[in-house]
C-alpha cells in the first residue's frame, strides 16, 4: 500500500494539535517546536502557543491570530524571521 490516510497531513482543530509539533514560519522553514497550548479548553477559546525557538531555544508566545493553520503534523504561522526576536518571552 502506498502510504496510508494516517500519514496524510490534514487540518485539525487547535485541541488536536500534535504534541511538540514543528512550527513553520511564513517562508516554510521550521522556526521551532510547539511546547504548550494556550487557551481555555472548556470554553474552546484558543489564545496561542508556547513556541520553543529552533535558534537559541528561547520560549516565546505566538498569538492565535498569527496561526492561520494547524495540521496533523505541523503548526503554520505567518511569522517572518525578523519577527522571532521580538516575540514576547514566556514567564
Image (cartoon, helix red, strand yellow):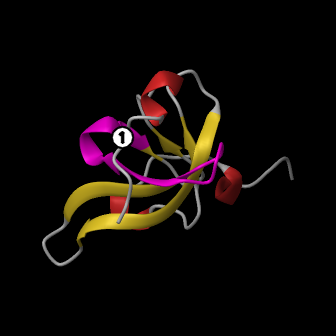
Residue nearer the viewer, 36 or 73: 36
Q: Residue furthest bottom?
A: 42
Q: Check disc 1: other Cα within 10 Å, few if <14, some if 14-19, many if 20+.
A: some
Q: Residue furthest left?
A: 43
- Asked if 30 appears above or below 62 in the picture, the reply is above
At 59% across and 63% down in the image, what residue appears?
Answer: 20
Q: Is residue 8 visible?
A: yes
Quadrant hosting residue 90: bottom left
Q: Is residue 65 magenta?
A: yes
With 80 as the anchor, is 22 left or right in this view?
A: right
- Asked if 11 appears above or below 77 in the picture, the reply is below
At 64% across and 38% down in the image, what residue appears?
Answer: 30
Instruction: Give the magenta range.
Output: 52-69
Q: Quadrant of the C terminus?
A: bottom left
Name the residue beneath numbered marker 1: 67
With 15 as the anchor, is 58 left or right in this view?
A: right
At 62% across and 54% down in the image, what residue appears?
Answer: 57
Amino acid at each position: 500500500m502506498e502510504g496510508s490516510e494516517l500519514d496524510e497531513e490534514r487540518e485539525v482543530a487547535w485541541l488536536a494539535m500534535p504534541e511538540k509539533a514543528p512550527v513553520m514560519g511564513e517562508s516554510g522553514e521550521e522556526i521551532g517546536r510547539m511546547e504548550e497550548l494556550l487557551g481555555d479548553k472548556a470554553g474552546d477559546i484558543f489564545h496561542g502557543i508556547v513556541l520553543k525557538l529552533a535558534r537559541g531555544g528561547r520560549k516565546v508566545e505566538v498569538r492565535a491570530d498569527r496561526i492561520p493553520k494547524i495540521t496533523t503534523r505541523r503548526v503554520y504561522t505567518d511569522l517572518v524571521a525578523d519577527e522571532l526576536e521580538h516575540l514576547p518571552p514566556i514567564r
